[in-house]
Image (cartoon, rainbow, N blue to C red):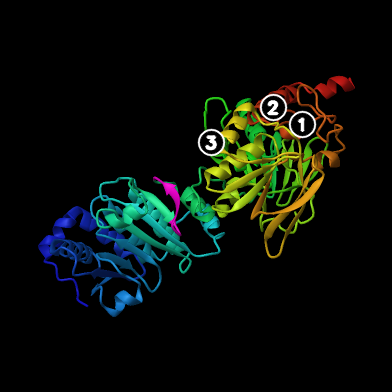
């Protein structure tokens, strides 16, 4: 263990006099000392060690708050703090888990300065909304941010990670990895562009992000395309409340706002509805092939430019009147009109064992659960576009797939049927699933061949159910809206329901159940609502 002994002249060259004075003033007001540890090893070039020492000494010239120590890789301190490579800077390890793997020069000097100041403050300086997102994290996160000294965007992402580690000490740990000093580590993670951010070895971001998106990505463990701030207002006044954040609701919001209406979206689950769990979308105009989640992210980011979205908030009651009052699990909204774009959910088989083994072999989303079945044998139940798409996606993931269909012909589009045949995915025709069996998890299916009149048991590790959707008409029924014989909201060609001021759009209306038709319905409904609020048709009827 040694104190920094770099000659003063070399240290001063790293920080020009004007910069020294600015830093001197910034560090003077910091309330806490800043322990800074440098770990060096025998494999390092001597000039690397000297540069690292000079850098530490340069900052010691402007403040006595920095408590610098140097240790070797074979020291007890290296073992204590889990340091196995060099050079590595470790910041205030008794309080935080923040390390810089390399020497922060060039653009990364900004990362070093901000990290030192934040530790001296003992505060993350994150926005309240960002802190709310980080507070949702309830399990440890090991964050790695790959950077380079020539990247002007890297400090933003690196400091995001540092702030998160300061905000949630003991839960979030951060390694900032200089790719120049750690080429082998960059190769292992295929981090060939910077900045790239991993959490628990999962890629959660490419490029620099605003702090809110970084926090959302860290909380969700995937790259977040948008950030929805939490709202504290107990009461919200607006022109239009849109219930449902799928393609219909998101499109309606954009069109309503652009018409001059103040609109909000309330979504009790995730944005995008069924689209968010669709592996691949190949029929949306202008986008030949795109992941369903990516398409939803694009739509949601667009809608957020115009309206507020209230996510994970459930509508409990809608009371008609002037204004209409909508009560949710968190607040009350008043509006001049309501659009029900509540969509549809996966229809279930209602076979014995389905509920018992849900999440333990039985699934309704290959995007979510497919990777868990790589190398295993699963069945997909259904014969439409969704079922065939699910089967193809699972095969692509390396899953042994069999399609089970209760009829003798598929209802899927011709090109999907062709892809199914090309992939060599077997189909059990005229077959019903009578029971799902297993012990701790699903192990087999009881299948009935309707044509042969024979029942047999076959081993399967999983079952993906894709047999259609159930319209979400609970709110519509509570309002007393007219419902069709098929269970959908009855509406006219302008998306007006049987109750003035209440409209519908998307899958909850029935029809083709396509993304493009749902989006079109949302746009049409929004334009109808604008016209009706300008010239209420129901008042003309009353007159």
Between marks 3 and 1, how big is the CA–CA gap? 24 Å
Magenta residue span: 199-207
In the picture, residue 239 is in which quadrant?
top right
User: Residue 167, percent across and down?
Assistant: 46, 62
* Tag 3 and tag 2, C-beta contact below 8 Å: no
> Which numbered dot is residue 521?
2
In the picture, residue 497 is in which quadrant?
top right
Q: Main secondary structure of the magenta part?
A: strand
Residue visible at 63% across and 27% down? Answer: 414
Q: Can you see residue 13?
A: yes
User: Residue 432, percent across and down?
Assistant: 77, 45
Q: Can you see residue 278?
A: no
First in sequence: mark 1 vs mark 2: 1
On screen, residue 79 above or below 327? below
Label 1 neighbour load within 10 Å: few <14, some 14-19, many 20+? many
> Which numbered dot is residue 509?
1
* Tag 3 and tag 1, C-beta contact below 8 Å: no
First in sequence: mark 3 vs mark 1: 3
> Which numbered dot is residue 298?
3
User: Residue 251, percent across and down?
Assistant: 63, 31
Which residue is at the front of the view, 526 or 140?
A: 140
User: Residue 444, percent across and down?
Assistant: 70, 56
What secondary structure is marked by label 1?
helix
Q: Quadrant of the N terminus?
A: bottom left
* Tag 1 and tag 2, C-beta contact below 8 Å: yes
Which residue is at the front of the view, 73 or 21?
A: 73
């Amino acid at each position: 263990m040694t104190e920094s002994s770099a000659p003063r002249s070399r240290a001063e060259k790293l920080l020009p006099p004007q910069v020294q004075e600015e830093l001197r003033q910034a560090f003077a007001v910091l309330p806490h000392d800043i322990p800074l540890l440098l770990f060096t090893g025998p494999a390092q070039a001597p000039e690397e060690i000297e540069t690292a020492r000079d850098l530490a000494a340069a900052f010691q010239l402007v403040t006595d708050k920095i408590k610098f120590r140097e240790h070797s890789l074979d020291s007890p301190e290296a073992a204590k703090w889990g340091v196995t490579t060099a050079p590595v800077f470790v910041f205030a390890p008794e309080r935080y888990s923040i390390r810089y793997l390399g020497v922060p020069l060039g653009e990364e000097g900004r990362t070093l300065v901000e990290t030192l100041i934040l530790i001296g403050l003992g505060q993350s300086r994150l926005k309240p909304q960002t802190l709310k997102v980080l507070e949702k994290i309830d399990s440890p996160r090991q964050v790695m941010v790959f950077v380079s000294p020539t990247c002007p965007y890297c400090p933003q992402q690196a400091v995001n990670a540092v702030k998160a580690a300061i905000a949630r000490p003991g839960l979030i740990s951060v390694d900032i990895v200089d790719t120049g000093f750690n080429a082998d580590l960059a190769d292992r993670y295929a981090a060939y562009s910077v900045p790239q951010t991993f959490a628990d070895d999962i890629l959660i971001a490419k490029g620099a992000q605003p702090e809110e998106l970084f926090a959302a990505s860290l909380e969700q463990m995937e790259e977040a395309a948008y950030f929805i701030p939490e709202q504290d207002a107990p009461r919200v006044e607006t022109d239009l409340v849109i219930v449902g954040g799928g393609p219909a609701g998101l499109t309606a919001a954009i069109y309503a706002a652009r018409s001059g209406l103040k609109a909000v979206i309330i979504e009790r689950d995730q944005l995008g509805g069924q689209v968010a769990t669709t592996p691949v979308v190949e029929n949306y105009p202008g986008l030949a092939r795109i992941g369903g989640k990516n398409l939803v992210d694009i739509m949601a980011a667009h809608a957020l430019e115009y309206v507020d979205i209230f996510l994970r908030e459930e509508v409990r009651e809608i009371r008609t009147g002037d204004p209409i009052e909508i009560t949710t699990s968190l607040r009350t909204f008043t509006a001049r009109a309501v659009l029900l774009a509540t969509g549809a959910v996966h229809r279930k088989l209602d076979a014995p064992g389905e509920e018992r083994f849900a999440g333990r072999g039985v699934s309704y989303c290959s995007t979510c659960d497919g990777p868990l079945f790589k190398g295993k044998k699963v069945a997909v139940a259904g014969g439409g576009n969704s079922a065939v798409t699910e089967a193809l996606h699972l095969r692509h993931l390396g899953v042994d797939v069999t399609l089970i269909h209760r009829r003798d012909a598929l209802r899927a589009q011709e090109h999907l049927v062709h892809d199914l045949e090309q992939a060599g995915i077997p189909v059990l025709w005229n077959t019903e699933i009578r029971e799902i069996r297993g012990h701790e998890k699903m192990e087999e299916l009881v299948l009935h061949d309707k044509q042969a009149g024979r029942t047999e048991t076959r081993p399967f590790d999983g079952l993906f159910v894709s047999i259609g959707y159930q319209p979400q008409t609970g709110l519509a029924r509570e309002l007393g809206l007219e419902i069709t014989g098929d269970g959908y909201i009855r509406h006219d060609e302008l998306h007006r329901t049987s109750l003035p001021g209440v409209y519908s759009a998307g899958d909850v209306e029935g029809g083709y159940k396509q993304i493009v038709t749902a989006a079109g319905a949302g746009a049409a409904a929004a334009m109808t609502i604008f016209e009706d609020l300008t010239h209420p048709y129901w008042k003309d009827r009353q007159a």
